[in-house]
Amino acid sequence: MKRPYFFITLIIGSLFSCREKLTCKNFRSGKFIYNTKIDNTRFIIDRSDSIQIETDLKTGFITKSKIKWLSDCEFEMHYVSSQDTTLDKLSPVLGNIPIMNRILKIEDDYYIFEQEIEGSKMRIIDTMWIKK
C-alpha cells in the first residue's frame, strides 16, 4: 500500500518542478504594480517591448516612456509625455536623459530592479510586482 502514495507524491512533485522559471525576457511586456518607497505612491505599469505607460493611482496621471532594451536584463527609458503638466513642461529636457534600469533578482510574483538617471548619482533599488 505504501507504493501508490510514494508514486503519487513523486508525480505531484515533478509537476511542480516542471513549472517554467521566469527570466528577464518575461518582463519585456506585461502589467506590473509599483509602490514607491519615498511616499508609497502606487502605479500600474503597462509595458510592451518598446513602450511603458505608468498610471499614478492617486492622481490618475498617465506618463508614457520609450524603452530600448540593451540586454535581456537591462533597458533604458526615455520620457515621452505625461498628463502631469509640471512634468510635461520639462519634457524637452527629460526626453534626452536616459533612465537606466537593471533587473537584479527574479521571484515568482515580483522582480527587484535598480534604476539610475544617467549622469546622476541618484539610484534606487526597489520591487516591481507582477499584476495578476
Image (cartoon, rainbow, N blue to C red):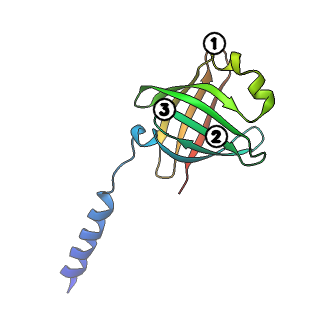
The 10 Å Cα crowd at callout 1, few under 14, some 14 to 19, many 20 or more, is few
Question: Which residue is the site of mark 3?
Answer: 50
Quarter occupied by the N terminus: bottom left
How far, Cα to Cα, is label 2 from label 3? 13 Å
Q: How many marks?
A: 3
Q: Tell me the mark number nearer the camera, choosing from 1 and 3.
A: 3
Image spot of residue 45 (x, y percent): 59, 43
Image spot of residue 72 (x, y percent): 40, 31
Residue in view at x 39 percent, y 46 percent? 22
Q: In this view, does 73 lie above or below 62?
A: above
Q: What residue type is labelled 3?
A: Ser
Question: Which residue is the site of mark 2?
Answer: 54
The quarter of the picture where residue 2 lies is bottom left
Disc with the residue nearer the chain's start (1 vs 3):
3
Q: In this view, does 14 lie to the left or right of 66?
A: left
How far, Cα to Cα, is label 2 from label 1? 23 Å
Question: Which residue is the site of mark 1?
Answer: 119
Residue in view at x 69 percent, y 17 percent? 92
Image spot of residue 56 (x, y percent): 71, 44
- In terms of secondary structure, where does tag 2 sit? strand
Image spot of residue 33 (x, y percent): 61, 48
Q: Is residue 44 above or below residue 98?
A: below
